[in-house]
Image (spheres, rainbow, N blue to C red):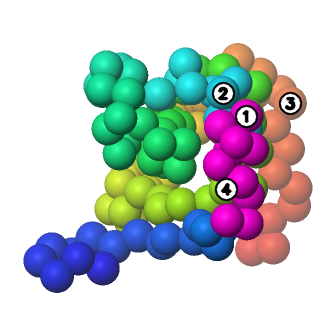
């Protein structure tokens, strides 16, 4: 948790040396194109160009990745290497957005196919 502010996040990396740097680079290479543009433009020797920092930047922006297959590649690297996740308020906002969009999709399907909706017998009747 930050000293100033209400946000906090979880930091769950693998121990240093657990996965050799060369292996981390191999694991991140297939997803590096998914990094935010600002990270791609950083100088090569910048600390945010290191494999763990790049993976963290990609993971924190996973909701902007359109293809499910690409999100799965990010997750597969993340679950091996680990790092810091987004703060709770960002995660909560993403959850609310998901619920809102899912509700709209659900209502559209109900309106298209009302004959297929069967909620079962009500326990109150």
What whole-number distance in Å separates the C-alpha atoms at marks 4 and 2?
13 Å
The residue under label 4 is 81
Residue 73 appears in the figure: yes
What whole-number distance in Å separates the C-alpha atoms at marks 1 and 4?
12 Å
In front here: 113 or 53?
Answer: 53
Q: Secondary structure at mark 2?
A: helix
Residue 26 has which mark? 1
In front here: 34 or 105?
Answer: 34
Callout 1–callout 2 Cβ contact below 8 Å: yes
What whole-number distance in Å separates the C-alpha atoms at marks 3 and 1?
48 Å
Q: Secondary structure at mark 3?
A: helix
Say which label, 1 or 4, has the lower sequence index: 1
State which quadrant residue 33 falls in.
top right
In magenta, the rendered stretch is 17-26
Say which label, 4 or 2, has the lower sequence index: 2
Foreground: disc 2 or disc 3: 2
The residue under label 3 is 116
Q: Give the residue drawn at x 75%, y 44%.
A: 23
The residue under label 2 is 29
């Amino acid at each position: 948790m930050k000293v100033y502010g209400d946000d906090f996040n979880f930091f769950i990396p693998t121990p240093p040396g657990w996965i050799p740097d060369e292996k981390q680079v191999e694991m991140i290479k297939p997803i590096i194109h998914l990094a935010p543009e600002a990270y791609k433009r950083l100088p090569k020797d910048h600390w945010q160009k290191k494999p763990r920092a790049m993976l963290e930047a990609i993971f924190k922006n996973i909701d902007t990745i359109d293809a499910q297959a690409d999100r799965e590649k990010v997750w597969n690297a993340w679950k091996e290497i680990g790092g810091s996740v987004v703060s709770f308020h960002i995660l909560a906002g993403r959850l609310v957005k998901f619920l809102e969009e899912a509700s709209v999709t659900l209502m559209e399907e109900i309106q298209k196919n009302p004959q297929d909706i069967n909620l079962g017998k009500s326990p109150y009747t």
